[in-house]
Image (cartoon, rainbow, N blue to C red):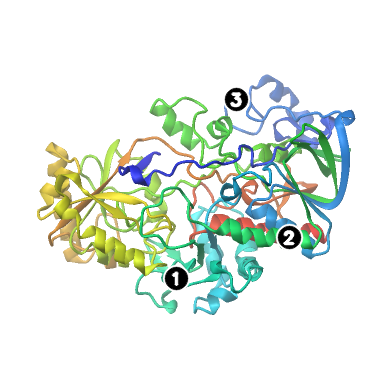
Amino acid sequence: MGIENKSPETTMGRRGFLKGAALAGAAAVAAAAMPGCSSPKSQSQSAEATQASTHPSGYMCSEDWLGEAPAIDESKISDVVKADVVVCGSGHSGTQAALAAAEEGASVVVLEARNVDSDTGYLHYYGQEFGHFNSQWLINQGYGPYDTGEIVTEFCRRGGNRVSPAIIRAFVDNCGEAFDHFIGLIPSDNHMLEMGPKGELGLHIAYGRNPEDYPIEMGGYKTWVGDAMFWGKYSDEPVNGVGAMSNISEAESFQVAEAERLGAKWYYGTTAVVCTQNSDGDVTGVIAKADDGSYIKFEAAKGVILATGDMGQNGEMIWNLITEVPEWCERQGVEAGSVTAMTMNDGSGLKMGCWAGGYIEPGPRPTMSMGGGGGGPWGTAPFLWVNAEGKRYMNEAVTVGAFSATLRQPIGTIATITDSKWLTTVQRASIDHGAPNYTRPQYYDDLVTDMSTVVAAGAQGGLVRTCTIAERMQSTVYGADDLETALKYAGYEGDALKEALATVARYNELCYAGSDADFGKDAEVMIPIDEPPFYVAPSSNSGKGVAGLVTLAGLMTDENLNVIRPDYTRIKGLYAVGNCLGQRFGNAYSTPTAGVSIGMAMTHGRVCGKTVANL
């Protein structure tokens, strides 16, 4: 990754995803396919320009990542299935769309490329958190109800107003009900609903805060309590892999069971290939390919919902569409098209929407690239950070901009510097994504236990278990009774060492003054570094952009999640949810509570399922 912790234990490797879990997509009738996502009205105007170009019209890129819509001869179709609603993909968003539509009385079919017997359930339902607001579950614990308008505004501000306020509002207004419904389908005596210090269901909160203290405002940004965490069982040992302990797949099994009870039918091992369209460009269904090579036509009386996920394993799409990432990478000699995310989705559902006449939101386009700043087991917390030259470079309380600000530093070490008061900083952090997490107080106890061994470890450094997510990954921390020695252990020498010492001295002056005149960090987290022992936790900035966990750029839609053309006319019968849906995150993943990627997927899926079923 572009910014990494040096400890090998923190590497988040890919698991056994099923390649192509995002279902393939295309435009329906060959005559209705629109090259370059052009609408029928604009096609003739742009035809000449398209022919002279090597890339789809409407995009500033160098390659034809889109290609032509597949044309499938009717003679190859072995079966025709009719339903009110056809859902392409059964991850978090597709499952909820299917369930909601079935609850509204619609007949529903779900196309899923994964085979039901394959051992990919975790990746099929990626992640472990359901970020939301104002559920009865939250309110019963004292958190909320919150002002939804204030939350929508915070989303829009974090997204630089490059989001759709209507799509954000559809999430904020409906996510509480969506969460209550989700856990309501899990039997009340199920182990997944057990809370408490070592329970399997947690709630991301900050240390020492009361319910009335939220939202927390730090670094100019607000955060609210709302991240429900399906953490699985407590482990005091390191466990590698993102979501490796998650039990959210099991929770999803109850959603599928209920949808099937209501009549929804899953077609596993069946990959959506092409939308069918009538002469007006309306989407009328989907042609899919089964594992045995046969084709099936699915006719949708009311609508098709694209829920096939991101473009994470399509290096060509990432290189041409997530433009900031390849620019950083190319400058460091990375081969074109080689950058991928941690999912196995190939973007074919996004292509499906484009072939039908839609288009992907304009750039800069977001990915889930988080983190940044110095290293350490405490996540993104407002410690002092210095770059490879020993210089401070930002307001460390602005976790929203930590990754991008760190990427702009000299290549090499990025370090966190602190002292014996390190726990105070951890306890005063916000609850942004990746921040210290007091969901399990035992994790803080483990953190204190591990930190107590760091100084004795000397130049080798000590391995410290993290306190941010369920997995017990580890970070290397160096400690000594004098700051210079701790910095040397972390790799600082020569001019960089002198600069780092001077930086700490300047930082302490600002702390004593009670005001950060250099970068404006909140006074409550301006804690002087003046009491031994001293600690340094390094990470590494390679100068390379990363696609992160998933890409987040999706199709343009209206407020009802109906896919639109470049001229803003609606494509009747075509909808997008999950990571097929655009206008959610601006140019980066920054949200006022953690877990929003999955929270939005489930909520928008549920909202869309109801909408289409009632057409």
Rendering coords of residue 142 (x, y %): 49, 79
Q: Which dot marks residue 63?
A: 3
Q: Which dot marks residue 215?
A: 1
Lateral position of residue 408 relative to residue 484, left or right: right
Lateral position of residue 606 relative to residue 62, left or right: right
Residues at marks 3 and 2, CA–CA distance in whole angstroms:
39 Å
Tell me which corner region of the image, top left, top right, bottom left or bottom right, holds residue 281. top right
Instruction: Tell me if I can see residue 175 in this picture.
Output: yes
Q: Secondary structure at mark 3?
A: loop
Tell me which corner region of the image, top left, top right, bottom left or bottom right, holds residue 598. bottom right
Rendering coords of residue 531 (x, y %): 13, 62
Residues at marks 3 and 1, CA–CA distance in whole angstroms:
45 Å
**Label 2 or label 1, whichever comes before in sequence order:** 2
Q: Secondary structure at mark 2?
A: helix
**Label 3 or label 1, whichever comes before in sequence order:** 3
> Which of the pair 556/80 is nearer the observer?
80
Name which residue lies at 39% across and 58% down.
468
Disc 3 crowd rating (10 Å Cα; few below 14, some 14-19, many 20+) is some
Please give the residue where the numbered disc 2 appears in the rendered image.
99
**Label 3 or label 2, whichever comes before in sequence order:** 3
